[in-house]
Image (cartoon, rainbow, N blue to C red):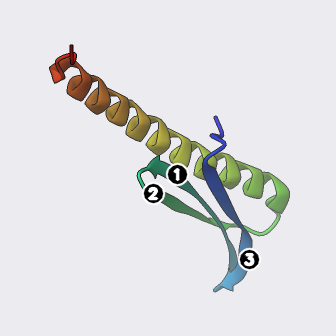
Amino acid sequence: MLNPSVQVAINAAVDKVVGTKREISVTFGRTINTGNYNSLRLDTRVTEIISKGEDMDEVYKRLWNEAFSQVERAETAFMKKQRAQVAARNSKTEPIM
């Protein structure tokens, strides 16, 4: 669910050797315009140490999906809370006649 007022930043996998194993990380983030010149930044980084012989592309895809899902869940929770707060404020407002 990409919102048009959302900026997305994706860092490619960082591959490095940790002892005899390799580490791969995926960083994913979004900046959400919350209105009134405010924004919310959501970032996550998912890291996995992979053994020799593991398919790097499969690990990367799995990490990408996890990072994307984490930010999606955080955005959904934030938007739900924000809508509830707006609804609560609107229900307390009396109409002007």
Q: Which residue is mark 3?
A: 15
Give the secondary structure at mark 3.
strand
Give residue 46's position: percent from left, percent from top: 57, 61
Q: Which residue is mark 1?
A: 32
Q: Residue at x 16, y 18 (%)?
A: 94
| Circle 3 residues within 10 Å: few <14, some 14–19, many ≥20 | some
Q: Is residue 20 visible?
A: no
Give residue 13's position: percent from left, percent from top: 73, 69
Question: In terms of image quadrants, where is residue 3?
Answer: top right
Q: Residue at x 66, y 43 (%)?
A: 4
Mark 1 is on which residue type?
Ile
Q: Earlier in the sequence, mark 2 or mark 1?
A: 1
Give the secondary structure at mark 2.
strand
Give the secondary structure at mark 1.
strand
Q: Which residue is mark 2?
A: 39
Between label 3 and label 2, give the one nearer the viewer.
Answer: 2
Q: Is residue 30 visible?
A: yes
Whether residues under marks 2 and 1 lie with C-beta atoms below 8 angstroms apart, the answer is yes
Q: Earlier in the sequence, mark 3 or mark 2?
A: 3
Name the residue furthest front. 97
Q: Residue at x 60, y 52 (%)?
A: 67
Mark 2 is on which residue type?
Ser
Q: CA distance from mark 3 to mark 2?
A: 31 Å
Between label 3 and label 1, give the one nearer the viewer.
Answer: 1
Q: CA distance from mark 3 to mark 1?
A: 29 Å
Whether residues under marks 3 and 2 lie with C-beta atoms below 8 angstroms apart, the answer is no
